[in-house]
Image (tube, rainbow, N blue to C red):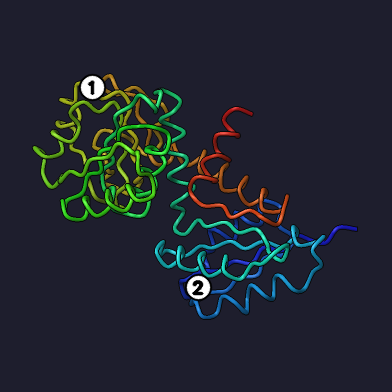
Amino acid sequence: MSKPKILIQFDSDAHASVFDAVVAVDSGIDHLLQYGSIEPAQVRDLVHGAMFTRGPQDLHQTAIFIGGSNVSQGEELLRHVKKCFFGPMRVSVLLDANGANTTAAAAVIAASRHLKLSETTATVLAATGPVGQRVARLLAGLGATVKLGSRSLERAEEAVKTLQERLPTAKLAALQTANATEIAEALEGSQLVIAAGAAGIELLPAEVRATAGALQVAIDLNAVPPVGIAGIEAGDKAKERGGQICYGALGVGGTKMKIHRAALQKLFTANNFALDAEEVLQIGQELETA
């Protein structure tokens, strides 16, 4: 008889995410163990508890999910989790702090329905935030030319430097997008724009989008009014607006949820998965072609 599926949720916030817990239950998890306020120093004992309570043949029935609202802290927790593994003694782990990986993957998949990304020039607005960084990283990894926009040129340049270290051949540019003129310049020659800003902040005014002659696809990942791209509604899904194919946050959200559930389910098919942005994107791509 197979062991029940146990998911151990590490959350850097004081209270582990209810959203992530509900998705886990809906994904068929038998038991969910939640830990909040997790610090790196606590990771080893928790991971050892997951690794040493079952034999190697049953370790695929235990997995770790790293959530929380702080993506940088989530990345640090993932590094510490990986350090605990040796030989066959390991369990699969998924990083999706603040939904950054699943959201970015869903946005990139939406764009790929309409554009050949290896031949696309994309502008990512709020590209220095956790979701924006992953959107830029995934697009660049697929061969797109990516312009990283930020209200701070210094922050955009730092994001480009970090991404270039990961992807040395990536075609990247850092741009300041602090006003309408700069945003319009950032959109010149871009077939794709993805806005990945914080809730309630408009990043792309309607009049600027209307003058972006090359723009074919516009994707907004903020559902809280005012939305990130003016003129797009949160529920838009491949909706034509002003000659552009538009997606709102809820239009992307259905794909994001499917990816989230599929990623959790994949954890329990083997004990050696470490799912970060690229692996989550691959799961989404497999869902698209299924």
Q: Is residue 194 above or below residue 32?
A: above
Check disc 1: other Cα within 10 Å, few if <14, some if 14-19, many if 20+.
some
Residue plotted at (45% across, 67% down): 76
Where in the figure is residue 250, as x and y percent of width and height?
43, 40
Q: Determine whether, in the image, residue 32 is placed left or right of residue 193.
A: right
Q: Does residue 119 lie above or below 281 as drawn?
A: above
* Residue at which label 2 appears: 15
Give percent across and percent down for residue 31.
72, 64
Q: Are marks 2 and 1 in contact (CB under 8 Å)?
A: no
Q: Residues within 10 Å of mark 2 (few under 14, many from 20)?
A: few
Q: Given the image, on which type of amino acid does mark 1 rest?
A: Ala
Q: Amino acid at mark 2?
A: His
Residue lying at the far top in this picture: please name it: 243
Q: Where is residue 192, by image quadrant?
A: top left
Report the residue that reaches farthest toward the left. Answer: 181
Residue under label 1? 214
